[in-house]
Amino acid sequence: MKSRTDAKKSCLLCVLGLGLLVGQGLQARAQHPQSAAREDSLTKATEYYYQAVLAYRTEQPRSAYQLLRHAHALAPEDGDIAYLLGRVAADLGREAESLPLLELAYRADSSRRDYAQTLVSAYFSRERMQDALRITEQLAKADPDNDDMRYRLVQLYARSGDLKKAIELCGELQEHFGRNVDAYAQVTQMKIQLLRMAGEGSRIFDEHYRRLELFPDDRAANYDYALYLIDRRLDDLLDKFLKDKQRQGYLKPSDAVVLRVHQAVDRKKYADAERLLASVNQDTTLPTEEKLQLWALISSSQQEAQNALLQDKYLPYIEQLVKLDPKAALQYYVQLLRYKERYREAIALLEPASKQRADEAWVWDEYFQDAVGLEDEAMIGRVAREALRYVPTDWRYHITAASDLYTAGKREEARVALERACQEVEPKTGIGPGRILGLLADLYASGTKEERAKANEYYEAALAAYDSDPEVLNNYAYRLAKAGQELDKAERLAGQAVKLSPKAAHILDTYAYIYLLRKNYTLAKLYQRKALDEAGESASADMYEHMGDILAAEADWAEAERYWTLAEAAYQKKLAEPDLEPSQAEELRATLPTLKKKINDAKKKIQRQQR
C-alpha cells in the first residue's frame, strides 16, 4: 500500500497527464519504516516535485529546475525526480549535469520505457553509440514488434560502424512491411544509403527492381527506378522502361516528360530541359510543387551556386503556375520576388491574398517582410495591426504595433499592448519574448515612481527569456549604472552587450560610462573614443558629456570643457525638435543647469592653470 504522499503524487501526475509513474525511491516509503526526519525529507521532496511539475507544465523551466534541485538533494535516489531534473537541465543547456541524472533514473527503474528512451537520446547526442545501442537492443528485445525501435537500431548500428547488421535489419523490416508501400519505400531508401556506405553499390539495382516488382503502379517507385537508370547512364534501359510503363498505364505521358527533363539536366542539355518542362508546365495532372522544383533545378544546375535565385527568364513560367494553381505556387513566387527585391510586385499579389487567405500565417509574414523591404513605415504598421487578428502569436507584429502607439504619444496604450503580447506570443522564450519584456522594462524605467520600481523585474524577466539581446543588456546595464547600483553586474551586462554589438555607439558609451563610475579612466576613455568614432556626426549629447566627465576626472580641463560644450549644443538641438516628447524635454531641461555648471567650473580651472 502506498503512503499518503505517494498517493497524492500519483494523483497529481494523472491530473497533469504527464505519463510519469512514481519511482522506486518514493515507493520505498510504503514498504520500509522511515525515521521521522527521513519521512519529513521525503515529504518535502515530494512537495518540491509537485511544484516543479506544475512549473514545467506552465513553461517555467528555470523555476522547475530550482525546485527539482531541492527535491533531488532531499531524495537523491528517487528516479522520478532525477529523470525530470535531467530533462529540465537538458532543456536549459546543462548537458553535463543532465546525463548523470538520466542514468540515475534508469538505474532506479530500467523497466521504464520513458527513462530508457530519453537516456538513449542523450547518449546518441553525445556520440556514445555503444551505450545507446546497448539500451536500444534491450528495448527492442522486450518489444520485438516496435518498428520505431528497429528503425533506431538501424541508425545505431550504422553510426557505430556495424553496417552489415544495419543492412540485415533493413532486410527484416522490408519483409515485415510486405505490402505497405510507404513503409517499404522508407526502409528501401535507408538500405540503399547503407549499401553505398558499405561499398556495395552493385546491390542497389536489385533493391529498386524488387520494390518496382512489389509496387508496379507506385509513381514514386517508378520515378526512383528511372532516376537510378539516368544516374547510371543506362539510356537503353531507360527508353525501354518508359515505353513499357506508358503502354502498361503505370506512367502518364507527362511523367515520361518529367523524367526526360531529369535526363536532360543530368546531361547538361539545359535548352532541351527547358523545352520539355515548358511543354507540360500547364498540365494539371502534374503536381505544381514538382514543376516548381524542376524549374529551380534547371536554373540552379546552370549556376555555380546551388542556392542561386531562379533566373529571370524562367519567371514567366512561374507566373503561369500562380494563375493555374495559386494555392500551391503563390508563396514560392512572392518569396522569389522578395529575394529579388521586387517588393511592390510581391505586395500587389499579397494584398488580395491577405483578404482571401487571411488565416495562412505565411501570407502575413511575406506581406510584412515586403513592407519592411520597401521601408514604408505606414504600411509596416498597418500590416502588423491586421496580422495580429490572425497571427497573434508572432512577436514582430506586437512590437511594431506597440511602437506605433508609443511614437504617436500613446504611452499607456503601448504598455497595455506589450503586456497583452506577453500573454499571446508563443513560444515564451527566445528573442521575441525577450525583446517584448525588454521594451516593457524600458517603458517602466521612464514612467512613474511606482512603475520605475518594477523596471528591474522586467529586465530580469527579459534576460530569462533571452539573454543575448544587446539592447536589453545595454539598457539594463545603463539603468543600474545611472542608479549607482550593482556596478559589478552592470559591467558584466554591458560587456556582454559590447561582445554582441561591438560597433554600436550607444552600447560602447554605456560600457565607458560604467568604467567612469568605477574610476577606471583608461578603459573609460578607450571605449568612449570608440563610441564617438562609431557615432560620427550622430553622436549624442550623452556621449559628449560622458567624454567630458572622463577627461575632467583626469584633470584635462580644456578638453573636458570642449566636450561639455559640444554636449550642451547637442542638448539644445534635441530640445528644438518639434516631435520631442514632453517628458524627454523636461528631462533635458533639468540636465542643462548641471552641464552649464560643469562648463563654468572647467573655465575657472583653466584660468587658474594659465596664471
Image: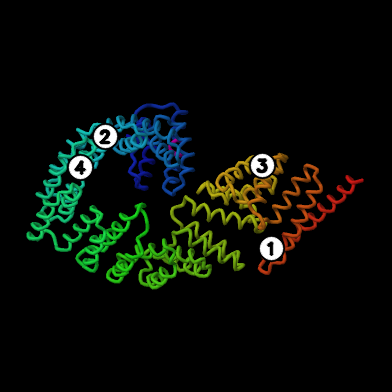
Judge whether residue 547 can be spotted in this image.
yes
The kind of residue tagged 4 is Ile
Q: Are marks 1 and 4 in contact (CB under 8 Å)?
A: no
- Give 3 or 483, whichever is nearer the viewer: 483
Alpha carbon of mark 1 to alpha carbon of mark 2: how far?
65 Å
Q: CA distance from mark 1 to mark 4?
A: 70 Å
SS under mark 2: helix
Q: Earlier in the sequence, mark 2 or mark 4?
A: 2
Q: Disc 2, disc 4: CB below 8 Å?
A: no
Tell me if mark 3 has few (under 14), some (14-19) or many (20+) residues whose alpha carbon lies within 10 angstroms of its own: some
Residue 487 image label: 3
Q: Is residue 46 magenta?
A: yes
Question: Neighbour class for label 4 at 10 Å: few (<14), some, many (≥20)?
Answer: many
Q: Amino acid at mark 1?
A: Ser
| Drawn side of residue 271 relative to residue 528, left or right | left
- Say which element carries label 4: helix
Task: Work out which quarter of the rendered image holds the N terminus and state it.
Answer: top left
The image's mark for residue 192 is: 4
- Give me the C-alpha separation between circle 2 and circle 4: 23 Å
Secondary structure at numbered mark 3 = helix
Q: Is residue 141 visible?
A: no
Locate the C terminus and report the quarter of the image it occupies: top right
Which label is found at residue 583? Answer: 1
Task: Indicate which label's residue lies in the foreground, 1 or 4.
Answer: 4
Within 10 Å of disc 2 (Cα), the crowding (few <14, some 14-19, many 20+) is many
Residue 449: % across, % down: 67, 56
Q: List the residue tagged with mark 2.
A: 136
Q: Which stretch appears magenta?
A: 44-48
Q: Residue at x 18, y 37 (%)?
A: 200
Structural distance between the alpha carbons of marks 3 and 1: 27 Å
The residue type indicated by label 3 comes to Leu
Disc number lying in front (3 or 4):
4
